[in-house]
Image: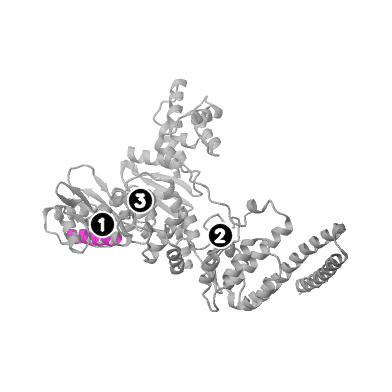
Amino acid sequence: MISDDDIQRVRQATNIVDLVSETVVLKQRGQEFWGCCPFHNEKTPSFHVTPSTGLWHCFGACQEGGDAISYIRKRDNLEFADAVRALADKAGIEISEDAARGPQGPKRNRLIEALGEAERFYHIQLMRGKSQGAVSARSYLSSRGFGSEICKRWGLGYAPGRGALVAYLRGKGFSATELRAVNLAVDRPGRTSDRFFDRVMFPIHDDQGRTIAFGGRVLGKGEPKYLNSSETPVFHKSKNLYALDRAKDQITATGTVILCEGYTDVISLHEAGFANAVAALGTALTLDHIRMLSRYRVREIICLFDGDAAGQRAAERTVQFIDKTEANLRCVVLPDGQDPAEFLGSHSAAELQAQLDAARPLIDFVIEARLDKYDLSTPGRRVKALDDVVEVLAPLKRSVLIDELATKVAYRLPGIEVAAVKAAIREKAVPRDASASARNKEEPTPPVNSPSRLDSISVSERRQLKLERELLSLVARYPDELRVSAPRMASFTWADARHEAMLWAMLSTPEKTDPKDVVAAALSVEPQAAQILSAGEVVASSAEAVQRADSLLDSLELSSDKRKLKDVRGKLHGGSTLDDAELKALFEEATRLQKRINELSELISRASIR
């Protein structure tokens, strides 16, 4: 487990504005920042970020909110511990985890450093190496149009093998265990050897630009043609995209991403001005990739596949995600079986742009490509074609789009009804790999203040809960200004005991405590404190906060006194077992409460008129 101290260090070290700005365009208004919510479609910004407290909240449709950890959990679809680790990596914080997780491997920071040194080693071998292998590597890259400047920009390299990398990194102080952990080295009889040898090396970076893995292309004959790093503690193929670190700004700016198949394709596209190109890494596109791209508010994903059988298969695998993203999935297959790098070698960027502008809906391309293989002139051949095309649509058998898909197929198959196509899709077995990759993960817990969490309580109780949260959010931002109101906060009965515990945890902090530490105090007594505190209305200044808090306290005291009066009257009406002194005390209490209720009602009424 990660210690509470490390979790708090990560929270304190994370700049919430910088984190959100990775994928959301924020505009400053006073001391706050606003943008369009990354978790639902909207045109009017309702997504609010407060730097002082490190909290964020959507005041629009989704009503989500919380702190940096909850943000990256939702954005990247991570478990809590993984979110903390991801933020720790961004902040350069080394966290310690207790023995409950079992034996620990090398520290992540060391692994990242080893990979960075490996990239530098490979690059030097390519640029300065005098061996025949280095010469062949330069010749290969030159044939792809990659001169020395492109090689420098992309950190391309050459792996000589024969233990050269292991010797170099051991000389830099890295252990064999660390090198094996990131798949730079493997154990062979009697020695630890380089994992890659006699290959052109393409360094793979995470979205922050740190080296996390490599792809190596063999020189000459040999299998596999491309050898990629295996899964490691810092690299997961299904959760990384090649060149995303370079492409993310352009993706966010344009709302479009070009998804292709290989390293050289991506480099060629970027060098030709298409800086929103990325590629999957030695694996088919996954649901995690789709979710990763959704961080950048992608409206269109153009699949730019090679014009061969492999490109067709890639398109078919991608179809299963059409209902998993709000982006429009489109497809381009280049003429004459060319890949993007080959096409750009003989065509201009404008000609490629024309191809992209003519991109077709992915589902139309896949259906037509399957059916075009058949002579549809006889009923038997149409039935056979139907069986073939539903194979690729089977992963969508439970999709709300099944009617639309069945209609598209039936239109191409005369004599076959839409209902028959739907039945065929539903009866077709889903390939195991497609079923696994398209499976939705566990749905997130509804927000603290979502209607589904509040529909079991009365309107008055619901209103008081909202007022309590408004007050707590003000205390989190302006604790020193509102400490003077502590006696009033203690005078009424809170509707939610968690709220009261959070209040006193925050007010128990010393004066001049940073608001982030005040929020941390609330989190120490209530795990959902960040979500609760993020939902308060925005105030422009401390003076406005004090005024707003006074108004909230009037309303909360009024609500509390009404409940107290109701209880007292209940005791009076059932007071046959009470003596005269007890009845008198209850009557006096009821009179006092009614007088105070009248005063507060008048005060609130005058304030609303003003």
Name above or below for residue 103 compared with residue 152: above
Which amino acid does the dot numbered 1 rest on?
Glu
Q: For the residue carrying disc 3, how many other residues have a C-alpha within 10 Å: few (<14), some (14-19), or many (20+)?
A: some
Q: Residues within 10 Å of mark 1 (few under 14, many from 20)?
A: many
Q: Position of residue 392 (x, y in %)?
A: 43, 34
Q: Is residue 600 above or below residue 288?
A: below
Q: Which mark is residue 528?
A: 2
User: Could you tell me which quadrant the N terminus lies in?
Assistant: bottom left
* Res. 195 visible in picture: no
Q: Which residues are magenta?
A: 112-125
Q: Secondary structure at mark 1?
A: helix
State the residue at coordinates (25%, 57%).
Answer: 178
Spatial distance from mark 1 to mark 3, Cα to Cα? 17 Å
Magenta segment main secondary structure: helix
Q: Amino acid at mark 3?
A: His
Query: Residue 157: which quarter of the image?
Result: bottom left
Of 180 and 431, which appears nearest the observer? 180
Mark 2: give few (<14), some (14-19) or many (20+) Cα within 10 Å: some
Residue receiving disc 3 = 236
Q: Residue at x 52, y 57 (%)?
A: 38
Residue at mark 1:
178
CA separation in Å, label 2 and label 1: 38 Å
Q: Quadrant of residue 578?
A: bottom right
